[in-house]
Image (cartoon, rainbow, N blue to C red):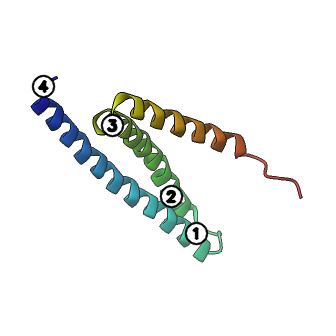
Amino acid sequence: MSAPNRRREQAELEVEKARLDVVHGVLSDMVFAGCDAADAKGYGNDEFEVSRYREAARRAAQVHDERTAVWDRLLDYRHDAATAAQIRAEVAAAAQRSRRTRGVGRSR
């Protein structure tokens, strides 16, 4: 790929990443607002709020996946191959640790 094409593609990915960051932030705010509204109602008669924040959470998960894919592609533009591979390995290890710690917490 020529240098101008590479710079153009990186710029497009940077814009897409920024757009997805904003969308994810808005959807996250919607989830928290729905939870707050349900809490304010004492978690009674809150079917509407629950349906709204569940839908926002579902869409936020989709946007997160898209944002992660764009971020992964950007690694190749922002870093050399070895550094990008190291970052990917560190992120994968952190995700693995996170998955292991989910579920039942420590017993008391």
Q: Secondary structure at mark 4?
A: loop
Residues at circles 4 and 2 in contact by the CB criterion of under 8 Å: no
Residue pictured at 71% horizontal, 45% vertical: 101
Q: Badge 2: few (under 14), some or many (20 or more) residues near its Cα, within 10 Å? A: many
Percent position of residue 82, x then y: 41, 29
Q: Which residue is mark 2?
A: 53
Residue pictured at 48% horizontal, 47% vertical: 58
In the rendered image of this protein, does residue 7 appear above or below residue 51?
A: above
Give the alpha-carbon distance from disc 1 to disc 2, as whole Å: 10 Å
From the viewer's perspective, tell me whether residue 71 is left or right of residue 47: left
From the viewer's perspective, tell me whether residue 105 is left or right of residue 23: right
Percent position of residue 4, x then y: 10, 32
Give the alpha-carbon distance from disc 2 to disc 3, as whole Å: 37 Å
Number of marks in picture: 4
Q: Which residue is mark 3?
A: 79
Percent position of residue 2, x then y: 12, 25
| Observer-nearest of 29 and 20 | 20
Give the alpha-carbon distance from disc 1 to disc 4, as whole Å: 54 Å
Residue pictured at 47% horizontal, 51% vertical: 55
Q: Secondary structure at mark 1?
A: helix
Q: Quadrant of the C terminus?
A: bottom right
User: What amino acid is found at the position of numbered circle 4 in the picture?
Assistant: Ser
Q: From the viewer's perspective, is the residue at label 3 or at label 1 nearer?
A: 3
Q: Earlier in the sequence, mark 1 or mark 2?
A: 1
User: What amino acid is found at the position of numbered circle 1 in the picture?
Assistant: Ala
Residue farthest to the bottom? 40
* Number of the label disc, if any, that sits on residue 38: 1
In the rendered image of this protein, does residue 16 appear above or below residue 5?
A: below
| Observer-nearest of 10 and 48 | 10
User: What amino acid is found at the position of numbered circle 2 in the picture?
Assistant: Tyr
